[in-house]
Image (tube, rainbow, N blue to C red):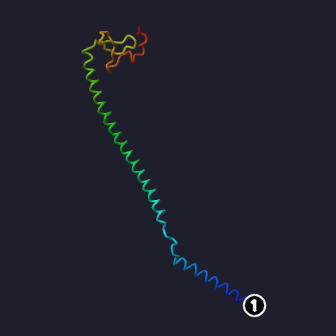
Amino acid sequence: MNELTELNDLNREDEQREDLKREADREYPKPFEGVVNIDKVMEERDELDKLIQRLLDAIHKLEEREKLAIDARDSYIEINAILKERLNNFEKLLPVIGEKGECRGCGAEIYWVHTKNMKKMPVTIKGLSHFADCPQAKDFRK
């Protein structure tokens, strides 16, 4: 029995030694354990720099598109104002240069104006050829 007790004591001592080693390893790491690989860090930084640059490029493109959209909207507003003014002027001029009439096909109000070949052409108040929007236009073709 004495031998068995001695074996158990030796096993306990071995376990205690192992526990002390593990604790020492945690408190005092071995040299170069946990040292950062600078090449890997530099590669990761380069990858992040590339991603940041791609993000900045995308933001710049979005800003350019937004500016183009704003410019397009402003141009549309400006052109629309010019067209409204010209249409208003045309509506005032049409009764002076054309004869007021009524379409025989659909009954719409039209003005007869002379083309450069001195032929009469039916025109709507919007300045369009009435042949383009009259539902009965095919009946008047020669």
* Count of numbered circles on the image: 1
Could you tell me which quadrant the N terminus lies in? bottom right
**Mark 1 surroundings: few (<14), some (14-19) or many (≥20) residues within 10 A:** few
- Measured as percent of width and height from the top left, residue 118 is found at 29, 9
- Residue under pointer 1: 1
Left or right: residue 7 compared with residue 55: right
- Measured as percent of width and height from the top left, residue 125 is found at 31, 19
Question: What residue lies at 67% left-to-right and 86% top-to-bottom?
Answer: 10
Left or right: residue 19 compared with residue 93: right
- Measured as percent of width and height from the top left, residue 56 is found at 39, 50
In the rendered image of this protein, does residue 43 appear above or below residue 87? below
Could you tell me which quadrant the C terminus lies in? top left
Residue farthest bottom in this picture: 2
Q: Quadrant of residue 111?
A: top left
Left or right: residue 93 compared with residue 52: left
Left or right: residue 12 compared with residue 78: right
In the rendered image of this protein, does residue 30 appear above or below residue 131? below
Question: What is the three-letter code of the residue carrying label 1?
Answer: Met
In the rendered image of this protein, does residue 115 appear above or below residue 86? above
- Measured as percent of width and height from the top left, residue 101 is found at 32, 12
Q: Secondary structure at mark 1?
A: loop
Q: Nearer the viewer, residue 116 or 45?
A: 45
Q: Nearer the viewer, residue 55 or 72?
A: 55
Residue farthest top in this picture: 142
Question: What residue lies at 65% left-to-right and 85% top-to-bottom?
Answer: 12
Q: Quadrant of residue 133?
A: top left
Q: Nearer the viewer, residue 49 or 103?
A: 49
Question: What residue lies at 34% left-to-right and 42% top-to-bottom?
Answer: 67
Q: Quadrant of residue 130?
A: top left
